[in-house]
Amino acid sequence: MYLAERLAADEVIFTAWSGVPDALTVEIVASQGFDAVTLDMQHGGHHEDSVLRSVVPIRHANKHAVVRIPVGRFDMASRALDFGAEAVIAPMVNSVSDARLFAESMKYPPLGGRSWGPTFSFGRLGGTSQQAWLETSNPQVVSIAMIETRAALAHLDAILAVPGIDAIFVGPSDFSIAWTNGRTINATLEDMMEVVGQIAARARAAGKHAGMFVMDPALTGRYIDMGYRFLALGNEQRYVALGSEQLLSAARKSAEGSSAGSVDADPYASSGRPGS
């Protein structure tokens, strides 16, 4: 089932976030319990070649491949789709003009102006015929515009009304900076939560989907109640840190009760060092 179909069914989708431009690392991330993997080209290290190669292990893991392009790189949106991505996140979509350029790169005519050339995606996504691909691609790819500035908020309804824009995605860290006029960065700022909820409600009222980067997993249920269904969690650094912390905590707790638990930190303190 395509990501677009699962979102249309109102499923909650958890996506991993990858910034390490290495297909082997992506393979490990994709093998975890996430529904999707997002390859970050904006703030992460992913580039065209790493996206091209990283889509393969994501697809082999039966997960959805998503790409966040750099700011304004709408040409890369088309390339990401041709590489086999099912969705593209475009940052800093602050105007109707931005939204139209993004949609133009994501959809084939008559909805957009995407150029034909599914060299890799046709095989990776199980294409059967070129005609069927042309007829089904537009509803199957998901165009996700990021809402993270006051300008984007001011134009939200107009952005949502652009044909070819399927969803919005809130970047809470940038949004907190904009919300406080540059005074603070706080992705979980309580003062902005009401408007964060309104963004999702307005998206859903327009028949579009809503996504969010979840900085605090404890807020996941609250975001779902607001209407967010595409939820990003952590990144490779966070996954390694959490796993290492859990492993070391368990090992150290067990070590405390072992026969070596009372041995001095210096193993030669009582017997003398070798050769002494």
Image (spheres, rainbow, N blue to C red):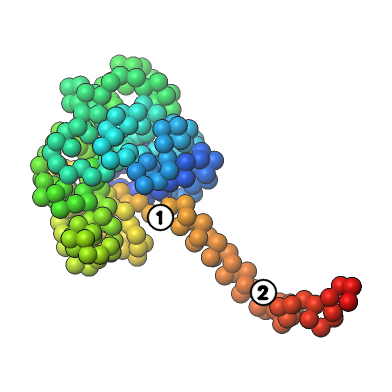
Q: Position of residue 124 (x, y in %)?
A: 43, 27
Above or below residue 53? Residue 25 is: below
Residue 193 visible from this viewpoint: no
**Up/down of 190 relative to 207, above or below:** below
Which amino acid, by three-letter code, is at mark 2? Ala
Q: Earlier in the sequence, mark 2 or mark 1?
A: 1
Where residue 117 sits: x, y (%)?
34, 19
Which residue occupies 74% across, 80% down?
Answer: 263
Between residue 138 and residue 26, name the one nearer to us: 26
Residue pointed to by mark 2: 255
Q: Residue 266 at x, y = what percent? A: 74, 77
Question: Quadrant location of the N terminus?
Answer: top left
- As helix, strand or loop, the secondary structure at mark 2 comes to helix
| Circle on res. 234 | 1
Residue 13 as seen in the image, left or right of residue 148: right
At x 84% / y 79%, what residue is drawn? 272
Question: Which disc number belongs to residue 153?
Answer: none
Label 2: how many Cα within 10 Å (few below 14, some 14–19, many 20+): few
- Left of 82 or right of it: where is 259? right
Q: Residue at x 28, y 64 (%)?
A: 186
Residue at the image position 34 percent from the left and 43 percent from the top: 42
Q: Residues within 10 Å of mark 1 (few under 14, many from 20)?
A: some
